[in-house]
């Protein structure tokens, strides 16, 4: 059974870059069957899909964050990472990594595994 | 982005009750709607995908229905382990969006 675990600093200063890593065990980020995804949830608010990366390295981002976000893959470490630049207090949230998979041949997708989430606070 | 309206935001129910949670989308998404359960301090898990398909290993107390813009998650005979937060997600088009969540509490 695949497991995902987020790691990174819990406190980031405004205007700096938030960097998080997701370590995958029980599965390979090189597998062509999955997308590797980041999702966040600010306190008291709903979940926000940040973006995802495929094993080929192709990525897709939420347009609301596109100018500040990048997701990368490190197959040698079986990890994928999130970088969010120029952070503000509005980026304070619990950040979760997850795995998306297709459930049918028509493009239906579900999140079949989630990490526990890591709280990140943006504050000076 | 596709807007998601989930209701209610919270509800109180007793063991054995039938519970329904609704999710409405701002445009038609066919059946590209998933439901998740999240317990405090735990990672979410998928219950229903494709609007009505039960995830393997999930109790048959859970069922999903709907298509287009209106969807329902039903829990028949609520059990103690079902007290949690439930949320919907559309995967019709990126950016995927989520409902605000429904917290199911013990009455």
Image (cartoon, grey):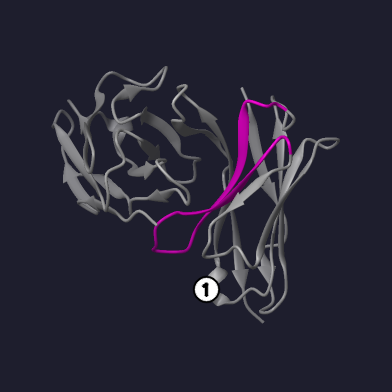
> Of A47 and A35, which appears nearest the observer?
A35
Q: Position of residue B65 (x, y in %)?
A: 21, 30
Q: Quadrant of residue A57?
A: top right
Left or right of B12 in this view: A67? right
> Of A38 and A119, which appears nearest the observer?
A38
Residue position for label 1: A90
Q: Residues within 10 Å of mark 1 (few under 14, many from 20)?
A: few
Quadrant, the C terminus of chain B: top left
Element on which disc 1 rests: helix
Left or right of A95 in this view: B85? left
- Furthest-right residue in this view: A76
Tell me the residue at 28%/26% (across/down).
B52
- Furthest-bottom residue in this view: A124
Quadrant, the N terminus of chain B: bottom left
Q: Position of residue A47 (x, y in %)?
A: 44, 54
Q: Which residues are magenta?
A: A31-56
Residue B75 in sight here: yes
The answer to whether A38 is drawn above or below residue B36 in the figure is: below
- Furthest-left residue in this view: B17
The question of residue B107 being in magenta is answered with: no
Tell me the residue at 78%/35% (across/down).
A78
The question of residue A39 being in magenta is answered with: yes
Tell me the residue at 66%/79% (across/down).
A14
Q: Position of residue B103 (x, y in %)?
A: 29, 48
Residue B107 in sight here: no
Q: State which chain disc 1 sits on.
A: A
Left or right of A105 in this view: A11? right
Q: Position of residue B48 (x, y in %)?
A: 35, 29
The answer to whether A81 is drawn above or below residue A75 in the figure is: below
């Amino acid at each position: 059974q695949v497991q995902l675990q987020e790691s990174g600093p819990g406190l980031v200063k405004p205007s700096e870059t938030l960097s998080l890593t997701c370590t995958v065990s029980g599965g390979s980020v090189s597998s062509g069957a999955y997308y590797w995804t980041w999702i966040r949830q600010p306190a008291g608010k709903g979940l926000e899909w940040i973006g995802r990366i495929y094993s080929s390295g192709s990525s897709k981002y939420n347009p609301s964050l596109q100018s500040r976000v990048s997701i990368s893959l490190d197959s040698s470490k079986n990890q994928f990472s999130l970088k969010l630049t120029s952070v503000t207090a509005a980026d304070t949230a619990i950040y979760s990594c997850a795995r998306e998979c297709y459930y049918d041949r028509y493009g239906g997708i579900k999140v079949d595994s989630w990490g526990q989430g890591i709280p990140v606070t943006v504050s000076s | 982005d596709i807007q998601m309206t989930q209701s209610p935001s919270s509800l109180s129910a007793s063991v054995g009750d039938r519970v329904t949670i609704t999710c409405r989308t701002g445009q038609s998404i066919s059946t590209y709607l998933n439901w998740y359960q999240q317990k405090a301090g735990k990672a979410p898990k998928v219950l229903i995908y494709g609007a009505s398909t039960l995830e393997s290993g999930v109790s048959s107390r859970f069922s999903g229905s709907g298509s287009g813009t209106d969807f329902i998650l039903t829990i028949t005979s609520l059990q103690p382990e079902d007290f949690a937060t439930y949320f919907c997600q559309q995967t019709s088009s990126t950016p995927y969006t989520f409902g605000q969540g429904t917290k199911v509490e013990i009455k």
